[in-house]
Image (spheres, helix red, strand yellow):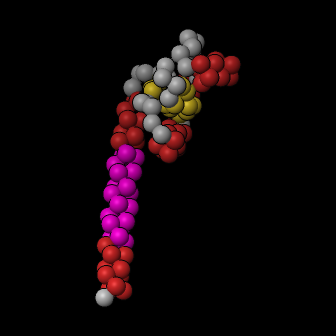
Amino acid sequence: AVVSTQSGHYGRGKREMRKQEEFEKKKREEYIRDIEKQVGEFVRSLEKEFRFGAVDKPWRAIQHDIGETAGLFTMSCYNDDHEKYVLLIKKEHMPTDDDGFKRRKFGKVSFKLK
């Protein structure tokens, strides 16, 4: 009786794990579609830069990948709360290396985009 109870419990745990994995996969796919949409709108816009909200590292990696695939310059920066976010800049408006370093390290640094 103990073996069957443990076996049943293990089976439920595996099912729950699979459900959770499917949920995470769906969440990631939806996030990718949303980021692709935002990047596409930015590329078609007249804006020179686009700033995503602060998110955890795995989500920033997706933002970087999609931005770079779209031919944009991407960098991680810190906001006023010392949280990291991704900044996209159209390549024709890229800052100098020094400006980019200051922006990345100190957050709001005023520099002219080309």
Pick the residue in front: 109 or 68: 109
Pick the residue in front: 42 or 6: 6
Pick the residue in front: 68 or 18: 18
Compared with residue 8, is residue 104 higher up or lower down, i.e. above or below? Answer: above
Image quarter in which the N terminus is found: bottom left
The residue positioned farthest toward the right in the image shown = 98
Determine the residue positioned at 48% across, 40% down. Answer: 56
Pick the residue in front: 83 or 12: 12
Determine the residue positioned at 33% across, 57% down. Answer: 23
Q: Is residue 100 visible?
A: no
Q: Estimate the x, y position of residue 26 in percent, counting from the top left.
A: 34, 55
Q: Estimate the x, y position of residue 32 in percent, counting from the top left.
A: 40, 46
The residue positioned farthest toward the front in the image shown = 2
Please tell me in which quadrant of the rendered image residue 106 appears: top right
Total numbered labels: 0
Left or right of 62? Residue 97 is right
Left or right of 6? Residue 81 is right
The residue positioned farthest toward the bottom in the image shown = 1
Q: Estimate the x, y position of residue 101 in percent, counting from the top left.
A: 65, 23
Q: Main secondary structure of the magenta part?
A: helix
Please tell me in which quadrant of the rendered image residue 31 appears: top left
Determine the residue positioned at 40% across, 40% down. Answer: 35
Image quarter in which the C terminus is found: top right
Region rendered in magenta: 13-33
Determine the residue positioned at 50% across, 29% down. Answer: 83
Q: Is residue 25 magenta?
A: yes
Compared with residue 14, is residue 52 higher up or lower down, i.e. above or below? Answer: above
Q: Estimate the x, y position of residue 70 in percent, counting from the top left.
A: 49, 39
Compared with residue 87, is residue 95 higher up or lower down, i.e. above or below? Answer: above
Q: Is residue 45 visible?
A: yes
Q: Is residue 64 magenta?
A: no
